Image (cartoon, rainbow, N blue to C red):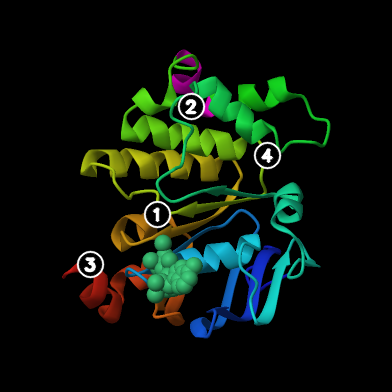
């Protein structure tokens, strides 16, 4: 149990990640507790995607541990971590454009091997996103950016994750869709899924988060409750332009 009483779901402890000889993440410590929405902020090339890749096991840290649901998963494969309950909405959503909404969702359900009914997974996703049910036979590539965001989240939720990782959900969306997109994220969070959201849009990401972390060239420079970070002088200067 951690200080606020909620159990730790994900913990990165003393992570150093390299690409070849280049030291990217330095002594990174980060936690997501059960039910939390945590934002990881930082400018371009600060190491945000590398953090997600380290959590998923797509890159191996040279030092440190990744703990998930009380288990040290550092040496485990990505597919093991996904079976244990991680899911990702990747950068730019990466939908299968020539496939229908339904087929895209099925790709997410493919990871569900614990015997639960697939029908139940579809119903859960369609309840969250009624529009996807209406559009289930439409090709994903013909949807608007905001609708594609729903498909990408729906696909990730088909595996019934404990922790949803999102890489820059606002990227490439028109401002009005960014707002809508964050409403959807909040809705998914309220349905009980813990989330770690990587963003450059600090204002928006902190407005819906419980806590936040700020990365600068692979090091954490700020962390704390979202409300405090929003008012923090350094963050305001660096990101919020006020
Ligand atoms: N596969 C890779 N090989 C070498 N360097 C990489 C690789 N992926 C990312 N980098 C470098 O690592 C740094 C952090 O990248 P990244 O984690 O993608 O940042 P962000 O997501 O914050 O924009 C950048 O300098 C980037 O050029
Ligand atoms: Mg990135």
Tell me the CA gap for discs 4 and 3.
Answer: 34 Å
Which of these two is toward me, 122 or 111? 111
Q: Position of residue 200 (x, y in %)?
A: 33, 62
- Residue that lies at the very extreme toward the front in this rendered image: 20
Nearest to the eye among marks 2 and 1: give it. Answer: 1
Q: Can you say which quadrant of the picture contains the C terminus?
A: bottom left
Q: Quadrant of ligand 2?
A: bottom left
Tell me the CA gap for discs 2 and 3.
Answer: 31 Å
Residue occupying image coordinates x 61% and y 44%: 192
Label 2: which secondary element = loop
Instruction: Name the residue carrying label 4.
Output: 160
Label 1: which secondary element = loop
Residue 27 seen in this snapshot = yes
Query: Which numbered disc, 2 or 1, marks the residue that appears first in the sequence?
Result: 2
Position of 107 with respect to 89 (left or right) is: right
Find the magenta span and give its range: 127-134
Tag 2–tag 1 contact (CB < 8 Å): no
Query: Which numbered disc, 4 or 3, marks the residue that appears first in the sequence?
Result: 4
Residue 225 seen in this snapshot = no
Position of 16 with respect to 100 (left or right) is: right
Instruction: Name the residue carrying label 3.
Output: 240
Instruction: Name the residue carrying label 2.
Output: 129
Query: Can you tell which quarter of the image residue 116 is in?
Result: top right
Tell me the CA gap for discs 2 and 1.
Answer: 20 Å
Tell me the CA gap for discs 2 and 4.
Answer: 15 Å
Query: Which numbered disc, 2 or 3, marks the residue that appears first in the sequence?
Result: 2
């Amino acid at each position: 149990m951690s200080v606020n009483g909620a159990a730790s779901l994900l913990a990165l402890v003393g992570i150093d990640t390299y690409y070849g000889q280049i030291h990217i993440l330095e002594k990174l410590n980060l936690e997501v507790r059960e039910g939390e929405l945590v934002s990881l902020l930082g400018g371009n090339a600060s190491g945000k995607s590398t953090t997600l890749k380290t959590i998923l096991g797509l890159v191996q840290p040279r030092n440190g541990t990744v703990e998930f649901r009380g288990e040290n998963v550092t040496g485990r494969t990505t597919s093991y971590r996904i079976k244990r309950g991680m899911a990702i909405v990747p950068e730019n959503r990466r939908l299968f454009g020539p496939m229908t909404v339904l087929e895209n969702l099925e790709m997410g359900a493919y990871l569900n091997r614990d015997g639960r009914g697939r029908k139940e997974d579809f119903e859960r996703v369609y309840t969250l996103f009624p529009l996807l049910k209406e559009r289930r036979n439409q090709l994903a590539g013909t949807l608007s950016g905001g609708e594609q965001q729903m498909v990408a989240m729906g696909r990730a939720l088909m595996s019934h994750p404990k922790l949803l990782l999102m890489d820059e959900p606002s990227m490439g969306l028109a401002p009005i869709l960014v707002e809508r997109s964050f409403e959807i994220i909040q809705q998914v969070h309220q349905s009980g899924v813990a989330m770690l959201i990587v963003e450059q849009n600090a204002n928006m990401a902190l407005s819906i988060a419980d806590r936040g972390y700020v990365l600068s060239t692979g090091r954490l420079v700020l962390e704390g409750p979202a409300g405090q970070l929003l008012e923090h002088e350094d963050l305001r200067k660096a990101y919020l332009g006020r």
